[in-house]
Image (cartoon, helix red, strand yellow):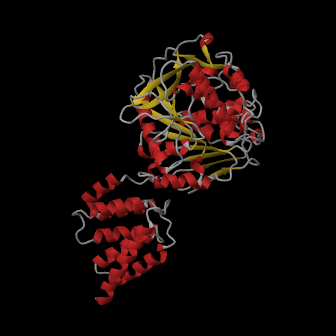
Amino acid sequence: MRAIKFHFCYWIIAMMVFVGPLFNSCIDNQSKQINQVPEMWGDLNPGPYTVGFKTIFTYDRAKPPVDFSDWDGRLYTTSETEGRQMQINVWYPARNKDSKGLIQFGHYVDLMGQQTEFGEINEEKRSFANQQFIAKTNALGGNESFTQDKLDILRLMETNAILNASPEKQSFPLIVFPNGGSPAFQSIMCEYFASYGFIVGAMALKGSKTFTDEASVSGIETAVSDLDFGLQKLLEIPQVDSKRIGLIGNAINSSQIIAYQNRNPNIDCVISLEGGLLSNFEQNLLKETAYYEPSAIDVPILAIYAPHPNIDPIYIDHLKYSERYFIHFPQMTEFHFLNYGPFNKFVPDIIGDHQGDVKNGYELACEYSLNFWKAFLSDDSTSKTLLSKIPHPELHEHIDSFFIKRSLKNPPHISVIKDGFIRKGYSFIDSVYQSHLPDNPQPFSKAFFKDLKDWLSWQKDEDYENRYQLYLIARESYPESAEINFYLAYFALETDRKEEAEKYYNFSLRYLESDDDPNLTSMRKQRIKEYIKEDMLRLQAS
């Protein structure tokens, strides 16, 4: 796999790219005189559309309701009984051009009080929402410095959205952006995308039993279910183009959306916004989920990341069928890529100390993200070109690393392989394998070999020869896999290749203890040892 890396000492000036002081010139140069934007937008240039905002209060009636839980673990009992509460926030291109109807930021905050208790907002819910927003902000680094007085400054500020505005009567791509419990966390970026002709849907991905999501295997599975429900509801909006869907996630949401894309080929592209997707911890969680198959992750990924001891692009090296764009922001932190970046201007150090200009860093992340959406959801050739351009040296303080890892060609789905086998025999499998080898030493995954082996075992390979040939190439791809050596030895034994069987059984035993395949549990390893012992006795007796 080749990485294309750009160093700032070598750059090419492209006049069509670098007109403004930052990356604004890479985006359509929409004048603020067309759409006046509120102060919290900073220097972001709006797109041509007025932005509407609405909230859908619905229930997943197949599941029970959940109680609200805060980040400290306190439970707040709900009175809801209809089902799992799903509040879905939607920003969209609107027809209403009257900026006098812009909602205040406090509206977004209030929605946190209506996550598990639907119905009209009242003072009790508003007070609860304020408390939760303050507590979460302090937990993210505010260290009790963020108070009600400071929240009031933000609550009274205008957003760039009109409540329940009439939508434009045309179709637009859909972006799904899970939030941490309220649109107040990522509203500016969502408004920004909507102003350029995207519909943006957000929902809180909850835990299995309570409101707060869980950094666990079961938590990811629960989030995938919530995403699927939320997406189905968003696709009911007449203006949503169901053929153009992107996902974006911050923190653990980035791994949750990848888990969902892994199962839903209708997703076209993904942004990890300083997400845990680039961590070993969350990769291990993903590998333990039921359907995780890296070969299914074959869509473009934009990975925006900041300094963190556990974050490294190397952890998604295995996603080789995805074209991955990496942008490192040395002055940012995980949550400055949310509203806290621009809010730092109005409430200094809102989530603690920071290294540099987080406002401009945030805006730059917005602009790169928009260009990514335009490239892969709107099929805009200019945006695709600009996305690969070398960042201007003036951006060096904001971006110190930018590189692309090009995707490899994905081999056919296993259903195509099965059909080819039925029509042409094992030679079809081998021809596909050989055609991918020049660029990809592991065209098929371990899971592929296992699934195809199991399929062949049902009345398609009575003499074991096809499975033996299959596992010869499996071992070529994964020579130190204890389980693959074990199966190759077994198929060699069944085809009367006794010397090979003994050799591969010994290889399996050699690698068994060091093999870190998560499917090789201690119980499974013990069973393999027992099977090998029995077969070795057979070999010695023959």
| Quadrant containing the N terminus in the rendered view | bottom right
Q: Residue, x 58% and y 12% (percent of image)?
A: 97
Frontmost residue, 202 versus 28: 202
Residue 494's quadrant in the figure? bottom left
Residue 445's quadrant in the figure? bottom left
- Counting labels gives 0
Frontmost residue, 207 versus 73: 73
Left of 441 or right of it: where is 10? right
Frontmost residue, 382 versus 498: 498
Left of 425 or right of it: where is 216? right
Left of 21 or right of it: where is 482? left
Q: Residue, x 41% and y 68% (percent of image)?
A: 523
Say whether residue 387 is visible.
Answer: yes
Frontmost residue, 320 versus 493: 493
Query: Where does the image place residue 244, in percent across and percent down from the top left?
Result: 46, 33
| Quadrant containing the C terminus in the rendered view | bottom left
Say whether residue 27 is visible.
Answer: no
Does residue 82 sit above or below 389 in this rendering?
above
Can you name the residue that lies furthest to the bottom here? 541
Query: Where does the image place residue 264, in percent across and percent down from the top left?
Result: 41, 42
Query: Where does the image place residue 373, in percent across and percent down from the top left?
Result: 55, 34
Q: Residue, x 38% and y 28% (percent of image)?
A: 82
Left of 60 or right of it: where is 74? right
Does residue 464 sit above or below 268 in this rendering?
below
